[in-house]
Amino acid sequence: MYAIEFETDITGRYLELKEWQHLMNKHARVIILVDENPEASEASDDVTEFRALQSVRQDKPEVARGVAIESMEDDINNDVF
């Protein structure tokens, strides 16, 4: 087993893995170590964020249940469109 180490600023809920193609279909353990910083802003409250998303989506059509999200993500990441 080998280790992949990287540093990043977390600005959203997803992290980008460089050279992710080499990691496809492999088991991985992910370890995140965060330096404690008392000046850092608190994480947003999940319930508040969820309710805000609900209110934004209120007038939009329901999302199709059979959409292949992972396949679409691969297409987007590989500039298929």
Image (cartoon, rainbow, N blue to C red):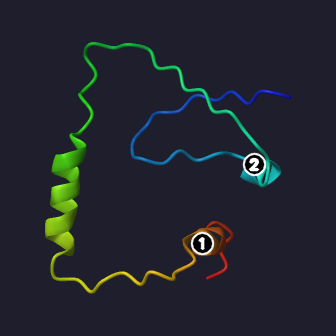
Provide residue 45's location: percent of width, then percent of height. 21, 40
Mark 2 Cα shell of 10 Å, populated few (<14), some (14-19), many (≥20): few
Spatial CA distance of label 2 from label 1 is: 15 Å
Check disc 1 and report its element: helix, strand or loop: helix
Provide residue 1's location: percent of width, then percent of height. 86, 29
The quadrant in which residue 6 appears is top right
Pointers 2 and 1 in contact (CB under 8 A)? no
Provide residue 10's location: percent of width, then percent of height. 43, 37
The quadrant in which residue 80 appears is bottom right
Residue 49 shown left or right of residue 25 in the figure: left
Mark 1 residue type: Ile
Check disc 2 and report its element: helix, strand or loop: loop
Query: Farthest residue in the front direction?
Result: 65
Residue 57 shown left or right of residue 71 in the figure: left
Residue at image mark 2:
19
Residue 29 position (above or below residue 16):
above
Name the one closer to the observer, 69 or 81.
69
Q: Quadrant of the C terminus?
A: bottom right
Q: Residue at 41% of width from left, 84% of height from top? A: 64
Residue 18 shown left or right of residue 60 in the figure: right
Residue 2 position (above or below residue 69):
above
Residue 3 shown left or right of residue 38 in the figure: right
Residue at image mark 1:
76
